[in-house]
Image (tube, rainbow, N blue to C red):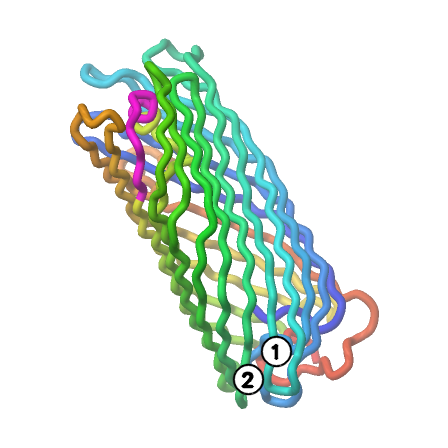
């Protein structure tokens, strides 16, 4: 959605899940999830493009946003005649922030720069083969994505195109008493996007790809011999969004596809993976996921707007586990990106990953020059 014209502050609350499920026929499923609860705060300023140029993106803008919150990790695989119990739970924290700057170059063009960091750190206690309410070891997890982008945007009558180059730093860390895995490195890519509006409708499409090679260092029992090598990493995404605006209300529906390949697993680790890592197996994760979200924003006064967003996600992930000693055969784990919430049939198939957001933005001071509403993509809905 287009940001508010002029100075504004934003606040919000969000609940989210990231869930992974490994179903095995005739055996209890192996389920793991991470559930962060965010407090979000933002501050910024924006001036619109003149006339009918563009499709809602400001010509000038700066913005800072932070999203901090605790998280809870939980993994469960119940014991069976052929499988031992494997469970873990713990707490962590997310420390996320985003910075954006956009400067106009004439009426039709703007240059853009952004920095974005998403970081999660957690500590879990693990129970392998023991009775309930006991633990056998502790685990430390870190997953971090830091990103920088430099872009350009060109505006037409009621339309705009944008392109950017991307710099990405990835970090994955997973350490227990029996194994130590750390990965990190810098990779590069780019993105393309377009927006167009007609009457009250706005259409937005975008795609990005980032890929390269990152460093991996591993150790595991019994000898904890150091293993160092480079491995491929790739992140691709595409998004399509459609918006409609009434005098006081905006509605956006968005569909997105995300594909990634990473040489580590540091979020919602499964019991089967924990056992494999302690045995010296190296992971190669390839995930494909679909996201659908709907957002509604309502202006109650010229200075106060509220927004509600609901997002559901589901997909698949294939983790290939290779024995570092070259003795045991390669294992493949076919994972569902779904949760374990609910009972009966819903418990057997899992629920989609969920994100829920509730927030508001507030105007600060007077109206920015030239900030009058000029179509449905503009954000001053009461004008």
- Camera-side residue of 196 and 181: 181
Does 1 appear in magenta?
A: no
* Residue 361 at x, y percent in the picture: 69, 61
Report if the CB atoms under discs 2 and 1 are less than 8 Å apart.
yes
Query: What residue is shown at x 49% (from left), y 61% (from top)?
Result: 166
Q: Over which residues does the magenta segment extend?
A: 275-285
Q: Quadrant of residue 363?
A: bottom right
The mark found on residue 2 in the picture is: none
Disc 2 target residue: 155
Image quarter of the C terminus: bottom right
**Picture layout, residue 352 above or below residue 306:** above
**Picture layout, residue 53 above or below residue 111:** below
Q: Taking 300 as reference, is 294 left or right?
A: left
- Camera-side residue of 123 and 283: 283
Q: Secondary structure at mark 1?
A: strand
Q: How many marks?
A: 2
Disc 1 target residue: 110
Query: What residue is shown at x 70% (from left), y 72% (from top)?
Result: 46
Q: Quadrant of residue 323?
A: top left
Q: Report how far apart the C-alphas of labels 2 and 1 lie in the structure.
A: 9 Å
């Amino acid at each position: 959605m287009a940001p508010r014209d002029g100075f504004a502050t934003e606040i919000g609350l969000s609940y989210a899940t990231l869930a992974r499920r490994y179903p095995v026929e005739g055996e209890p499923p192996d389920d793991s999830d991470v559930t962060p609860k965010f407090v979000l705060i933002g501050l910024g300023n924006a001036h619109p493009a003149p006339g009918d140029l563009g499709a809602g993106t400001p010509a000038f803008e700066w913005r800072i946003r932070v999203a901090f919150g605790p998280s809870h990790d939980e993994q469960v695989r119940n014991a069976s005649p052929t499988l031992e119990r494997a469970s873990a739970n713990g707490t962590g924290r997310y420390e996320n922030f985003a910075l954006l700057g956009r400067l106009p170059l004439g009426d039709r063009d703007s240059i853009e720069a952004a920095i974005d960091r998403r970081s999660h750190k957690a500590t879990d206690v693990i129970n392998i083969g023991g009775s309930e309410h006991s633990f056998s070891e502790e685990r430390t997890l870190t997953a971090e994505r830091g990103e920088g982008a430099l872009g350009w945007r060109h505006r037409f009558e009621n339309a705009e195109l944008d392109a950017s180059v991307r710099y990405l730093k990835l970090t994955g860390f997973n350490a227990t008493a029996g194994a130590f895995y750390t990965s990190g490195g810098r990779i590069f890519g780019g993105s393309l996007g377009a927006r167009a509006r007609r009457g009250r409708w706005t259409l937005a499409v975008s795609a990005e790809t980032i890929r390269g090679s990152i460093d991996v260092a591993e150790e595991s029992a019994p000898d904890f011999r150091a293993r160092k090598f480079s491995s491929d990493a790739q992140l691709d995404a595409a998004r399509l969004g459609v918006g409609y605006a009434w005098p006081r209300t905006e509605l956006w529906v968005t569909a997105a596809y995300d594909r990634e390949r990473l040489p580590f697993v540091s979020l919602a680790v499964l019991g089967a993976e924990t056992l494999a890592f302690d045995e010296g197996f190296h992971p190669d994760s390839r995930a494909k996921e679909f996201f659908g979200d709907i957002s509604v924003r309502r202006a109650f006064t010229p200075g106060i707007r509220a927004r509600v967003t609901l997002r559901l996600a589901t997909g698949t992930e294939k983790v290939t586990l290779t024995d570092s000693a070259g003795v045991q055969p390669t294992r493949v784990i076919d994972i569902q990106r779904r949760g374990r919430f609910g009972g009966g049939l819903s418990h057997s198939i899992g629920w989609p990953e969920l994100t829920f957001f509730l927030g508001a933005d507030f105007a600060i001071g007077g109206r920015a020059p030239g900030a009058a509403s000029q179509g449905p993509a503009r954000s001053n809905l009461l004008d």
